[in-house]
Image (cartoon, grey):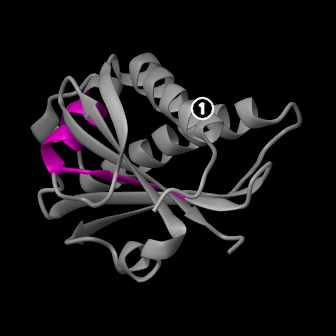
Amino acid sequence: MEIYQPTVLETLGEAVAASLEGLAFVDVEEWKISDDFSLWNGKGYHVYLDIDAPLTLRLHLLLDPELTREIVATILVEEPESVPPDLIADTLGEILNTLAGRFAGELQEYEPVIGLPTCRWVEGIPDSLRKNDEKITIVRFKLDLGILYAVLESQDF
């Protein structure tokens, strides 16, 4: 369900593209609103954080293991197989924090209020995204390395 104005979604698309390109040299080939997680392979990393200003929402990313390893290895200049799980979680948290700062900062001129990221391994769609499907907007990003899902979850409704 789409609950945000096109400007908010365009800003999210630009923030994802700029963050991934700037941090990991990953190109966003296209992005679009999705009705579901049909291209999600069923397991991977779920990283999320809260944004309290200028909007009140939770921003989620879902990444499959292969995409995650490639992105993290590029940022850390390591071989994908040699990156330990705790460093994967920390790096994904930093990516989301950077992305959220770009996103929220572009929506308003004042300093955004952003919470700390949480990263965890999931199998299947996280419960928080299934239970609140009437409060979420799913955006699917086709990257040169794979598929990434970004989800905006309303905290206001």
Q: Is residue 108 above or below residue 60?
A: above
Residue 59 location in percent, x, y?
A: 54, 55
Q: Is residue 150 magenta?
A: no
Q: Is residue 133 above or below residue 107?
A: below
What count of labels does the image hold?
1
Residue position marked by numbered label 1 in the rendering: 11
Q: Residue at x 54, y 30 (%)?
A: 15
Q: Residue at x 54, y 64 (%)?
A: 153
- Left or right: 13 in relation to 83: right
Residue 101 location in percent, x, y?
A: 66, 37
Between 41 and 47, the one nearer to me in the picture: 41
- Left or right: 155 in relation to 27: right
Residue 90 location in percent, x, y?
A: 43, 49
Give the residue type at disc 1.
Thr
Answer with the quarter of the image where residue 45 lies.
bottom left
Residue range corresponding to the magenta coloring: 59-73
Res 100 visible: yes
Rendered-image quadrant of the N terminus: bottom left
Q: Main secondary structure of the magenta part?
A: helix
- Left or right: 1 in relation to 149: right
